[in-house]
Amino acid sequence: MTDRADGAPSARVRPAATRTEGQWAYGQREPLNSNEEIKKDEDPLRVRERIEEVYAHRGFATIDPADLRSRFRWWGLYTQRRPGIEGGRTAALQPEELEDEFFMLRVRIDGGRLDLAQLRVIAGISTEFASDTADITDRQNIQLHWVRIEDMPEIWSRLEKVGLSTTEACGDCPRVVVGSPVAGIAEDELIDATPAIEEITARFVGDPQLSNLPRKFKSAVTWLADVPYEINDLAFLGAVHPEHGPGFDIRVGGGLSTAPMLAQRLGAWVPLDRVPEVWEGVTRLFRDYGYRRLRNRARLKYLVADWGVERFRAVLEDEYLHHRLEDGPPPVLPDRPIDHIGVHRQRDGRYYVGAAPVVGRTSGTMLAALADVARAHGSTRIRLTPHQKLLVLDVAQPQPLVRALRGLGLEAEPSGWRRNTMACTGIEYCKLAIVDTKQRAATVITELEQRLRDQHIDISINVNGCPNACARTQIADIGLKGQVMNGPDGSQVDGFQVHLGGSLALSRDSDGRVGRKLRGLKVTADELPDYIERLALRYLAGRSDADESFAHWADSAPEEELR
């Protein structure tokens, strides 16, 4: 099989037992849902021309709905939620009733790498065009809010002058490539994966042949197990081959949302210089064989689940790579999970300092001050982590920097609660959300820091405003999925369904598992501090020893202990 001149695959013969899923590889090219119709009509990347030449001059009211609610995403733009709409009305309203005339803008930061010039530009855009908003996401991006369509040409111009973009930051396309925030400087790293990430983004981001995938495509390339590689569609994780030396293990088919699945090993190993080739092969395979009939089955994980990894690997090798991959061993995981908070030595003898904003919330003002502080302490490089944290690299004397960061509200010696809590955007801006997340999580952190200040407790809390798991609820020690529920007096209040004991295989003593859902276990938002305090104290009293993790304890604890 070879691709046609327009980038589409030539039709293959569909096995008789294969259900029609809208797969291009079998010639199933007719639009099967409204999203596919919109993408068929026009490459979504082309909408930028209309934004710059038409909508930025004529205003929000002139935007074609197909552009507004679909194609804009390929340039990192989502309409944000109109203020004042209660969570209970989220599912009942039409998009035009939910959306405001302002946008969330996602700045793409592959591998989480920023220099100070880039940081200052983001800070300036935030303060001038985005009401001083700036949230660090759990995929190493920065999201701005209150952005007007009229300002997008100037925003793009400023970003692109310093090598940043919003290209394919959202949409059915290759999203940001997650990478280790300490790539190239970590003492225990054998290969710096940065060249592979740079080649992937230079060659394939914005490529029209890959801009129409069945759904979003998330990938990670890292030597260290310091990113959540198991929940990506495609992940390359450092592994040493017994004959060929350091390279990368390959996993496919990860993803969360309403049907969580962890990525599976292909059993294959590749050297650094072939990572982009394999990345392209998997992406094209997804484009051609991915399911397009039903939107809720269009992620790669469903194809991997139906095919199995053996068939997936065979198709990848035979039809896309045209050679066999080397069999390889699994990665050797570290003794403990890595989050990079605090002071750490680099391989060159200098230090990096990891700091925790509260659930990823920063501002343009804070980022501008961070650039000044970093410069004053000899650093020109900032890194964002996939846990809503940030690092300052290349520091000779770290303790003065720790104190300076604290003055900005960036804590390098945080409590366990601040260190281990994440939250999605929530009802403040998101049209899908049902409850508040950022402020609620911040309140919980403050309460627990006071109530349990004398206890050392390592428990992760992930707070999500809806079932879509943007904050990775199913793989946290305590995952909180927002919903409206009945309060003590019978009235409807904000609440959360609770997931317990989820984890990823980020160390030798942990494994990837989706958290438990106990029947009827729901907690109102106001009850969260009491519930988590009660659960934490039961964990401390009931664990088998000081090294037993919360996830392991929660997996086997009696149900009454978890309520």
Image (tube, rainbow, N blue to C red):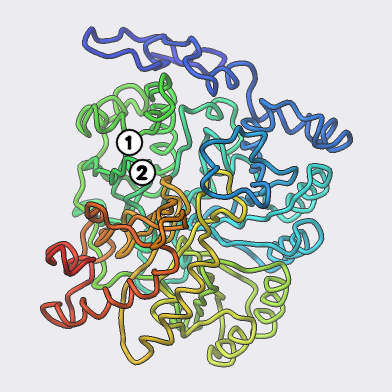
Name the kind of residue labelled 2 in the image. Gly
Q: Is residue 508 visible?
A: no
- Say which residue label 2 marks: 255
SS of the residue under disc 1: helix
Q: Position of residue 445 (x, y in %)?
A: 45, 76
| Residue 246, picture quadrant | bottom left
**Is 423 situated left or right of 406 in this image?**
left
**Is 326 situated left or right of 1 in this image?**
left
Residue at 82% x, 33% y is: 55
Residue closer to the observer: 258 or 372: 258
Marks 2 and 1 sit apart, C-alpha to C-alpha, by 7 Å
Question: Which of the image's four quarters has the C terminus?
Answer: bottom left
Name the kind of residue labelled 1 in the image. Lys
Residue closer to the observer: 285 or 517: 517
**Is 260 situated left or right of 36 in this image?**
left
Q: Residues within 10 Å of mark 1 (few under 14, many from 20)?
A: many
In the rendered structure, which disc, 2 or 1, sits on the residue that comes first in sequence? 2
Question: Which of the image's four quarters has the N terminus?
Answer: top left
| Residue 538, picture quadrant | bottom left
- Say which residue label 1 marks: 301
SS of the residue under disc 2: loop
* Furthest-front residue in this view: 489
Q: Position of residue 245 (x, y in %)?
A: 27, 56
* Furthest-right residue in this view: 57
Q: Residues within 10 Å of mark 2 (few under 14, many from 20)?
A: many
Q: Position of residue 486 (x, y in %)?
A: 40, 54
> Do the residues bearing badges 2 and 1 touch, measured as CB atoms within 8 Å?
yes
